[in-house]
Image: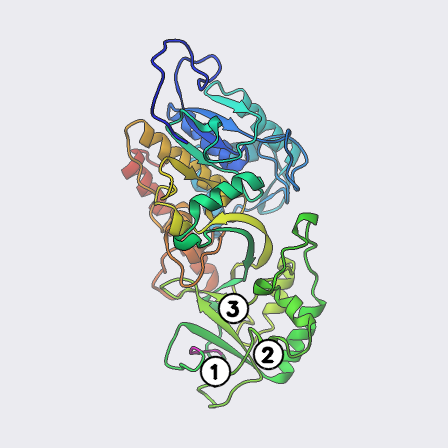
Amino acid sequence: MPDNNESQSSEPQANEPRGHQARLKVAVIGGGLAGCECALALVRAGVGVRLFEMRPEKRTPAHETGRLAELVCSNSLRSEELTTAIGVLKAEMRELGSLVMRVADETRIPAGKALAVDRTLFADYVTAIIEHEPGIDTVRAEVESLDSPLLHGFDAVVVAAGPLASDALAASLAEATAGEGGGKRLYFYDAIAPIISRESVDMDICFWGSRYRPEEDDYLNCPMTEAQYDAFLEALLAAEKVAPREFEQHIHFEGCLPVEEMAERGRLTLCFGPLKPVGLPNPRTGEEAFAVVQLRAENKEKTAFNLVGFQTKLKYPEQERVFRLIPGLENAEFLRLGSIHRNTYVDAPEVLTEELELKARPGVYLAGQITGVEGYLESAACGLWLGLMLGAKLTGKTLAPPPTTTALGALLGHLRTPPAKSFQPSNAHFGLTPDLNRRAGKKIRKELYGQRAREAFAQWKMDTLGEGDG
């Protein structure tokens, strides 16, 4: 734990970086994208860092090497276009001096409009930069607890252990984040349903109303005839699925079964589950449909909607193809696609402050995917932001976050905003930002979101960092 009792000796202490007399101030746990971004941002602010990485002494089920910032699932860092939230996030990260973006640009390989990298070169470059940075002391050791002696003597501790945090550290985090009466605030698996844009829903087909409460508008309902249901079911059962990794084989439990697995249990299983039509008469006919797909609002503005019960292992292109067979969603714009996978993360709005500090353990901060952001770039952006903010704080300055109209500000806002139901991780998408409050076609709307974000970020830089576009 952070400890402000410093030795008065003039000799270099055990928590000083190699070759430096300056005291190490922050311990960073985890040498993934978030941890490396955070560590380098802290050093640039004049704050010494000790970076703990347990690999290669202790492996995870997914990583293959001991390199820092190893990409384990994909070499794609997604779209570069400024009409996408992830493209805008990349631009913002570049302007903030992101290590990940600099190395990605140096190791990129052809991938059309996407940014893809040579995974081996990428990890080699990041490892070399971090290990040769004199302000960072890289230690290959597992930190098993927030109370570990390895963490004594630091002003702050950053946990950036990622979704495959060791069992021991995860247990320590679970204890630190438990709610009243021991309530669970640390989760080990994601069951994520797709999110679609409200403007892409055909309201000539869908209707508002909660079960037995037609006057409420918390849900949009997509009614299905028997023929439509059977066509959807056939496509769902035939769709190609993502093969789980060996350590994910046991993740399916009754509370979050994939929609396709429920469908395999019998023709009418979905009709008695998430597609149950009972209590949802169509106001146009006064009759109940054979089945109803419900969409639940994801934000207060009701611009983004979750497909209730549609957590899935279908491949991304299959999700778009199959779910557009649902009446009213023929032209659905997917802001986020569904998944079920191992992912250790906290209930951020409940357990973290706006500075990503554990409410129950002052001085301990979280960064990256463990906070509830989803994706390589989002994790790196979170680590970058925490490093910038914490570096400013430890050197007597303050740094306000970007506005929620920016990609980074919206992502941070997701971690601060209590959800309508249960908190779930999210990647960057424009549904996290405030509504445009104007009607526009799909293509123009994305351009407007991107343009607004770029203008807001430029203004924030000018006001907060004193930096213009140049």
Horizontal arrangement in the rendering, residue 203 relative to residue 117 (left or right) = left
Q: Which residue is drawn at the image coordinates 56% and 49% (left, top)?
A: 343
Mark 2: few, some, or many residues within 10 Å (few <14, many ≥20)?
Answer: some
Amino acid under disc 2: Cys
Residue 455 place in picture, x, y as percent: 35, 46
Q: CA distance from mark 1 to mark 2?
A: 13 Å
Q: Main secondary structure of the magenta part?
A: loop
User: In terms of image quadrants, where is residue 395?
Assistant: top left
Residue 453 place in picture, x, y as percent: 38, 49
Mark 3: few, some, or many residues within 10 Å (few <14, many ≥20)?
Answer: some
Q: Is residue 209 magenta?
A: yes
Q: Nearer the viewer, residue 460 or 263?
A: 263
- Upstream in sequence: badge 1 or badge 2: 2
Amino acid under disc 3: Val
Quarter of the rendering occupied by the N terminus:
top left
- Upstream in sequence: badge 2 or badge 3: 2
- Disc 3 target residue: 308
Element type where label 1 sits in the image = loop
- Disc 1 target residue: 280
Q: Is residue 146 above or below residue 263?
A: above
Q: Which mark is residue 271?
A: 2
Quarter of the rendering occupied by the C terminus:
top left
The span shown in magenta is 206-210
